[in-house]
Amino acid sequence: MTYTEKDKQYKRYTITSALPYANGPVHIGHLAGVYVPADVYARYLRAQGEQVLFIGGSDEHGVPITIKARKEGVSPQDIVDRYHKIIKESFAELGISFDIYSRTSSAEHHKTAAAFFEKLYKEGKFVEKTSMQYYDEEAHQFLADRYITGTCPHCGNEHAYGDQCEACGTSLNATDLINPRSALSGNPPVMKETKHWYLPLDKDEEWLRQWILESHKNDWKVNVYGQCKSWIDAGLQPRAVTRDLDWGVKVPLPEAEGKVLYVWFDAPIGYISFTKELKGDDWEKWWKDNDTKLVHFIGKDNIVFHCIIFPSMLKAEGSYILPQNVPANEFLNLEGDKISTSRNWAVWLHEYLKEFPGKQDVLRYTLCSNAPETKDNDFTWKDFQLKNNSELVAILGNFVNRTLVLTHKFYGGKVPARKALTPAEEEVIRELATFPERVGRSIELYRFREALGEMMNLARLGNKYLTDTEPWKLVKTDPERTATVMNLALQICANLAVLCAPFLPFTADKMHRIMNLPAMGWQHAGSADLLMEGHTIDQPELLFEQIDDAAIEAQVNKLQESKRQNELNAWQPAAVKPTVSFDDFGKVDIRVGTVLECSKVPKADKLLQFKIDDGMGGRTIVSGIAKYYTEPEKLVGRQVCFIANFAPRKLKGVESQGMILSAEDKDGRLVLVSPSDLVTSGVNVG
């Protein structure tokens, strides 16, 4: 039994994609890791005629949202309303084909999540535990991990959080921090007893080991299986499902005042509540029918939640199906550095859509062809340009455009008749028939890069066929053979319109429109008879356009500006040098002088030559600040501070009789030190 035949046992597919936090926009790391592969999979299954429910939504609870709201002086609802709108609209514009994109702040979600908790509570599926937790006495609030900052015990970073040090990347517990402080008041927190409910994962260890490590050993991705095995082998521990917060789904118990469901517990229930929102009373078959295949698309940071914790929740409830696969991707880096929202080192989807209008498929193609399926991968703007210019334009776009242009030139836009085929053309038709299965099988195995490569191989086949047959020359000597060549080239174009649709939906729509193709399912692809003789082709349009160097340079400069701003924001004054005596300081003769002349030192890009009125007949001083004062003549008349008793030294042949004082700003600029009021040249500073 092939994988495809095995998969046909399912009547419907429930596809979920990890819920992005609504405390910021979506970036390319999210897209490559989760949303583009999930969308390719959903579009492919729909093309196969399957019943598909593709679920997405915003995760609108959790500490990061409350922290952002506090920083901006607005309510958490203001934050989630703002970013939910941006995320939902940008997903839609990129063509992520959710059947529903909802939000966890909805009334339906709060009702569903609370009821889920309550059922497990009444059936005794939780354990109740008291523990000591940090508490801010001034704010009268227990502190979540992100509300505690302090010094990292590993690298000494003084701004580490209670769950992670972003400087060295180490995961932490709040109690690991040195000199912990409350992010609310700035005060040292105290330890205070609190009560919470826990999911006893330790009791699920045996069935999880059998379900994951035995049943899914051969069909789950190696990275997913490996992370799950590591967690299970280390021994599972009970995990709290509630928190002391005022933002989230309220715990539906009288004794739980001031407590909400932990975001990792309530967020995946969103998949269920969103289904209820869309399907009404018909929702259960998508979650409780064994004829339904449940697939979670996530990033690797969510593997444990979707492979161990959420299945344990579903199993404890008792009536739900479990996921058949969790095809998690690794992380996508950007220009050799880890994507970071806090450092603004990212390519934001909503900004890309504005700066590259009409190029949704270029981004989809680049992210799919470079997807971090088995290891972390890197996005660069140069590679983005290369993928567009050398692959989409030069291979796919070139083949389709050449074929359609020649069809209009030779046949007035009508599909010509196909006559006798050569053995080479019969082989082309045989190979054409293999592509739907080649592309489809790779998609079903969650090998999306491989699937995209197969689709492009069909475009390469078409290009080679045109190059080998040269219909632009052949038409002069053998019109009948030319008609056959063009008919077959057009059949390949029609197949590409079907097979590229999961990856490049906007391009597929454009090809269908230009070629006047009716809606076609996956079962139609592979045929050399999709277009009948005499079928009308509209005027050709370029599918893709070259992206020039200036557009790429602008994006690289934008990132470099983000990097510069990060460095400025991270700047701290240098440590004070060792103490010196007043007598030592008194040996340095600092005076004020007036600039009489200033010019660049020949053959020295960094040096300026100053003629200074020092009140004692004048002196020459050379200073390495030419980079920051490009019009030295404008310094004439300015007063500067200089050290008068340094021994003279020659710089590029000029004797320098002192040192002009400058201050290095946090951005690296050197700025001349000058008195704020005009004083007599030669007076001492001190």
Image: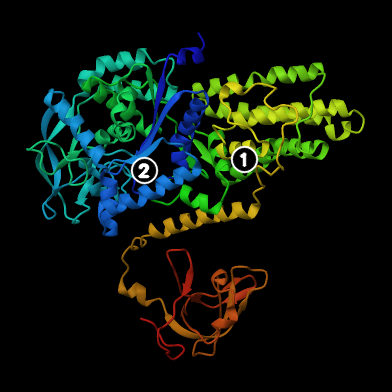
Q: Which label number is shown at residue 493?
A: none
Q: Do the residues labelled 2 and 1 touch (CB within 8 Å)?
A: no
Question: Residue 290: horizontal and vertical position, in percent?
Answer: 34, 16
Question: Residue 411: horizontal and vertical position, in percent?
Answer: 81, 36
Q: In this view, does 406 lie above or below 323?
A: below
Question: Residue 358: horizontal and vertical position, in percent?
Answer: 57, 48
Q: Is residue 555 above or below residue 492?
A: below
Who is closer to the viewer here, 222 or 517? 517
Q: What SS does tag 1 mark?
A: helix
> Residue at 69% across / 36% down in the picture?
395
Q: Which label number is shown at residue 168?
A: 2
User: The residue under label 2 is which amino acid type?
Assistant: Cys
Q: Is residue 387 left or right of residue 428?
A: left
- Any part of residue 272 in sight: yes
> Residue at 54% across / 71% down in the picture?
628
> Residue at 24% across / 25% down in the picture?
313
Q: Is residue 591 left or right of residue 193?
A: right
Who is closer to the viewer here, 565 or 640? 565
> Residue at 55% across / 56% down in the picture?
557
Residue at the left extreme of this rendering: 255
Crowding around mark 1 (Cα neighbors within 10 Å: few <14, some 14 to 19, many 20+) is some
Q: In this view, does 115 lie above or below 548?
A: above
- Residue with the mark numbered 1: 510
Residue at the front extreme of this rendering: 534
Who is closer to the viewer here, 488 or 627? 488
Question: Residue 343: horizontal and vertical position, in percent?
Answer: 41, 51
